Image (cartoon, rainbow, N blue to C red):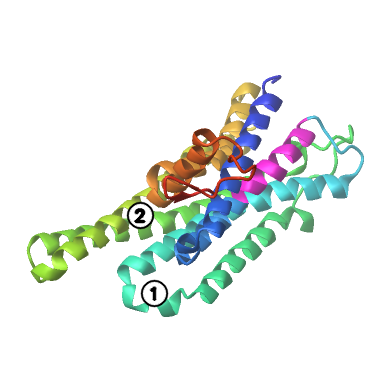
Amino acid sequence: MGQRPSDDSLTALLSIAGNLFICTVILWNRKLRSNVTNYFLISLAVADFLVGAVVIPCAQFTEVGYPQARPQLCLLMLCLLLVFTQASIFGLLAIAVERYVSILKPFQYQSLLSPRNSLLVIAACWLLSILTGLVPLMGWHHPLPPSRECLFNSIITNTYMVYFNFMMCMLVPLLVMLILYGRIFLEVRRQIRKVAEGEVNISAQRRHRIIIRKQMRTATSLFIILFFFILCWLPLHVLNTIMLLCPKCCIPTQLILATIILSHANSAINPVVYVFRMRSFRDAFESTLLCICGSGPLSTSGTMPTHINGKPCY
């Protein structure tokens, strides 16, 4: 149990640094900023940033029972853990819907997902995350234990975590996302076959193939993000379900702590996927390394360099 704070602190630092980098790259790069898909990536990066900046520190406080004898503050801190982690799943759902519209309904894309509509969808996702995460504040929780310690498992009920948080707020969106990505990959495969069979004219064939390849790579990258989310969060929810259905089952404390750390680690994984799978982020990362390593912290004039080898410094 002594390894938990140091492991979580490292995860928090990686989550903060990685997701701050992603947000900065998108906001500073005009081309990335004009892509509606990146609106949703920023929203997801903000949620992951808050996991590192708020959720993990709050989890470390509640792990040792703080704040003591202050039930409302304790419950609010525990609900914040639920709000920001729930924002990730709704953010992933919004991304899946955006990709579905982009690939299967390209002619309606501009009207359905204009910048204004996209921001409204993102706002709705955050509002839904807040409402679902604050449900325990409305009474679905245990009272503060006699020890007056603020412990997650002592305050937040397993019925809420399993029946509401897991089955309704995670499994249902995940099922929808898997269906959407299944439809996306089938449609991309159909388009690839169409191009291969020469059903488009030769002049458009090359351009169409490039577009399809780019769509496929983007969809695959986003599906990888979804895969890591499932991989990181499912073990914790499975343990919660076992503890609810089998109260007498003995689950090692180290295993519970390991699944908690794994769930938090998901917020540090997404920026790595962006950098290694998406060319625009990889180029930005390489430019940053060139600015730091290739030129040093300052140019000869004493100012930060703005370009290295023709590439902008972020």
Q: Which residues are magenta?
A: 47-63
Amino acid under label 1? Tyr
Amino acid under label 2? Ala
Say which of 237 and 62 sits in front: 62
Residue 268 sits above or below residue 104 on the image: above
Q: Magenta segment: does it hold 51?
A: yes
- Residue beneath the point at 7% across and 65% down: 198
Say which of 12 and 138 sits in front: 12
Residue 26 is marked as none
Tell me residue 134's x, y (percent): 72, 56
Q: Is the residue marked by circle 2 packed among few (<14), some (14-19), or many (20+) residues within 10 Å?
A: many
Find disc 2 in the rendering and name its residue: 219
Q: Is residue 264 left or right of residue 115?
A: right
Using the rendered view, name the quadrant where residue 64 is placed: top right
Q: Is residue 223 left or right of residue 151?
A: left
Q: Is residue 263 visible?
A: yes
- Residue beneath the point at 16% across and 62% down: 206
Residue 37 sits above or below residue 279 on the image: below
Using the rendered view, name the quadrant where residue 97 is placed: bottom left
Find disc 1 in the rendering and name its residue: 109
Tell me residue 249's x, y (percent): 60, 26
Tell me residue 77's x, y (percent): 78, 46
Q: Secondary structure under badge 1?
A: helix
